[in-house]
Amino acid sequence: MNTQDHDAAIRQALPEAAVLTAAPAPVEVAWAAQALREQYGLVGRLSLLTGERDSNFRLDLPDGTRCMLKVSHPDEDAVVADFQTQALLHIAQVDPGLPVQRMALTVDATPSVLLPDDQDRPRVVRLFSYLEGLPMPQAERSAAQRRDVAGTLARLDRALSRLWHPAGEKELPWDIQRADRVRALLAYVPDAGRQALAHRALDRFESLAKPVLPALRRQPIHNDFNVFNLLVDPAAPERVSGILDFGDMVEAPVVDDLAVAASYQFDEQGDALATIAEFAAAYHAVSPLQDIEMSLLLEMIRARLAMVVAISGWRAARHPENAAYLLRNNAISWARLQAIDAYTRAQAHDAIATACRAVRPAAEETNAVI
């Protein structure tokens, strides 16, 4: 199969991945400054920030206040951006102590506005508060930090549990519910052993997890609670001080959110299952897990890691100029996938259930008002 035919097969198997192949669509600083002035009545210094799909700018106002201006990619449906907007507004109401960005209103008192860019493409424009903190990858890692990540995620999931939005049911590429769709992307993995490792993870997902997904608790989830989307307090790096990037939100089994986060937190060089169980127990202490969720957690972690290596490898092959960024989680994801390859579902369930029984769920003691 030639490259063109292979890409066509991938588009058929994973149509929602089209957004990942869209060309960048940056906006000029002058355009952003005009939008800021006309829509928010603000003037300040704009500095371009990194972003995978959106155009992001840091805004420094004369009084020292910092904000972030976000201009969505033109290929992103406005309803998807609104899902993220409504989630942040909802969190501010039900658990204002969660360290998420706050929305600034336009001069017309709306949390976002749809504007045509220089090529007359519609762009969703929003202004957020700027979260200060140390990016977690730059901080010292510790068991206390892992526990705080798990507990913070549990609070976030509780806060989102009563949110509904029509965009939640849209098919997105980073959705573990559809992990088996990334099989075609494994053709871009050159190593046969690694291919087989990822295929085993997807086989287990298809046989053990996918048939029971309809029976699991579902709700909107963050879906990308990885270390690159978390900030910590520089003076207390064990404490999460900021949660970033709600751009992959989806309605899904709540255990998927825990699986995504755990994929970035367990010790691939030590007792991987023990650290997964400890992480799950810290989540359980704030938002109790059901037994079936404990039973499926490892399969969902394996599926997530298979997605990471498949999607990142495919995208890096298509965009070699951006390969370093796209493959930043690749090596450790392969190591983690290998570290948990031999565990059985029964072993995982026993370890996780035992760890959860050792903690006393205290969901009612959280500051969230659910």
Image (cartoon, rainbow, N blue to C red):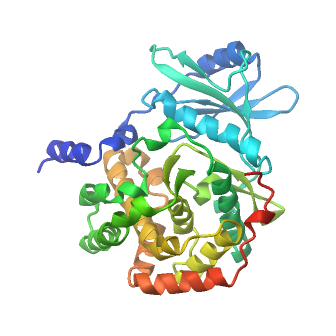
Q: Residue furthest right?
A: 63
> What residue is drawn where x is 46% and y is 68%?
301
Q: Is residue 256 left or right of residue 358?
A: left
Q: Is residue 220 left or right of residue 314?
A: right
Question: Does 97 sit above or below residue 255?
Answer: above
Q: Quadrant of residue 261?
A: bottom right
> What residue is drawn where x is 42% and y is 29%?
75
> What residue is drawn where x is 35% and y is 64%?
210
Question: Does 267 sit above or below residue 219?
Answer: below
Q: Is residue 203 left or right of residue 343?
A: left
Q: Is residue 346 left or right of residue 6?
A: right
Q: Quadrant of residue 92?
A: top right
In this rendering, does residue 311 appear at all?
A: yes
Name the spot of residue 221 as percent of width and height, x first: 56, 52
Name the spot of residue 186 as percent of width and height, x first: 28, 60
Q: Nearer the viewer, residue 239 or 110?
A: 110
Question: Does 133 sit above or below residue 18?
Answer: below
Question: Does 335 sit above or below residue 33?
Answer: below
Q: Residue furthest front?
A: 215
Name the spot of residue 17 as percent of width and height, x first: 35, 44
Q: Nearer the viewer, residue 208 or 182?
A: 208
Name the spot of residue 345 as percent of width and height, x first: 41, 81
Q: Quadrant of residue 176?
A: bottom left
Q: Residue furthest left?
A: 1
